Amino acid sequence: MDKLIITIASTGNVPTKDITPYAALTKEEIVDDIEKCSKLGASLAHIHVRDKNLEPTSDRNTFKEVLDEIDRREIKVIKQVSTGARGGENTIKSRGQMLDLNIHMASLSTGSSNFSSLVNANSFELINALAEKMYENNIKPEIEVFDTAMLFNALYLLKKGILKSPLHFNLVMNVPGSIKGTPKNLMFLYDNLPGNSTWTVTAIGKSHVQLTTITVALGGHVRTGLEDVIYFDKDKFATNEMLVKRIVNISTAVGREIATYEEAKKILSLT
């Protein structure tokens, strides 16, 4: 069993200071949290950025500012950017504008799904174009699976040569409107993964601890952070540091070691 890769998703498109006082929104807050979490065991950072009004954006220059600051501080994390639809216009140009920057990975949703208040729309034209740009820039896609069809779409795209083996999946579970976060649903997705792939589970909200523990025991990898989990328990706000420490504790209890930055790069076949 490979050592555990912990991904820190320190902020997403949803958290605000009104939702949680610990939301990381500015460049300094985002990089501060990535730095703290890397020292605790996170070896991969899933990165969203905000504009000057602290609204979600896909702006290339804003991403560059955050990435440059990570490099300036010499933070040892795999840098993975979001190409999600909620950061700006849902176009190839907008969603792929940061894919020429100094990064290791980028998210790639391989189909459309529902969120609680909007449609996560990803046409095959858009998927193909984003994948092509990633490979041109030596960026490994992380295949985002919000619903079951997205897994099978990825296998189809692999067969067509649009995606390249070995694949890395992120099974995103318990988003309202998409696949429910249950052990049975996790096992279905797990059973249908290609044999030589790597995989991470992102369990949203109340499903987080249960599915994380199962994933660690099965040999998968885990994402955590305020993009996915606001409360540490029923009455207590989480911080990114608290969430990473909990994953480390779960992994220790299961008897699985935590991957370093260099080990995580090797596990994910990153050059």
Image (cartoon, rainbow, N blue to C red):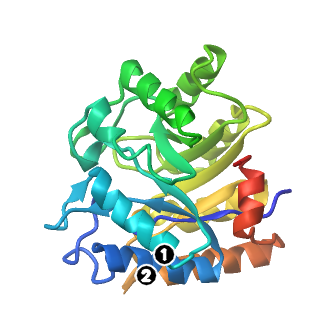
Identified at 69% across, 75% down, the residue is: 250
Task: Please tell me the numbered disc located at residue 44.
Answer: none
Where 90 falls versus 174 (above or below)?
A: above
Image quadrant of residue 21?
Answer: bottom left
Q: Nearer the viewer, residue 76 or 190?
A: 76
Where residue 112 appears, as percent x and y from the top left, is 37, 30
- Front label number (1 vs 2): 1
* x and y percentages locating residue 94 in the rendered image: 27, 39
Residue at which label 1 appears: 72
The image quadrant that residue 3 belongs to is bottom right
Residue 156 relative to residue 196: left or right: left
Question: What is the tally of numbered marks visible in this picture?
Answer: 2
Distance (Cα) linking label 1 and label 2: 12 Å
Residue ID for mark 2: 32
- Where, quadrant-wise, is the N terminus in this rendering? bottom right
- Horizontal and vertical percent position of residue 90: 25, 35
Query: Going by the picture, which residue comes out furthest to the top?
Result: 160
Position above or below: 159 against 196: above
Q: Tag 1, which secondary structure?
A: helix
Q: What amino acid type is highlighted by mark number 1?
A: Arg
Amino acid type, residue under disc 2 in the picture: Asp
Disc 2 residue crowd, few under 14, some 14–19, many 20+, Cα 10 Å: some
Residue 146 visible from this viewpoint: no
125 versus 239 height, above or below: above
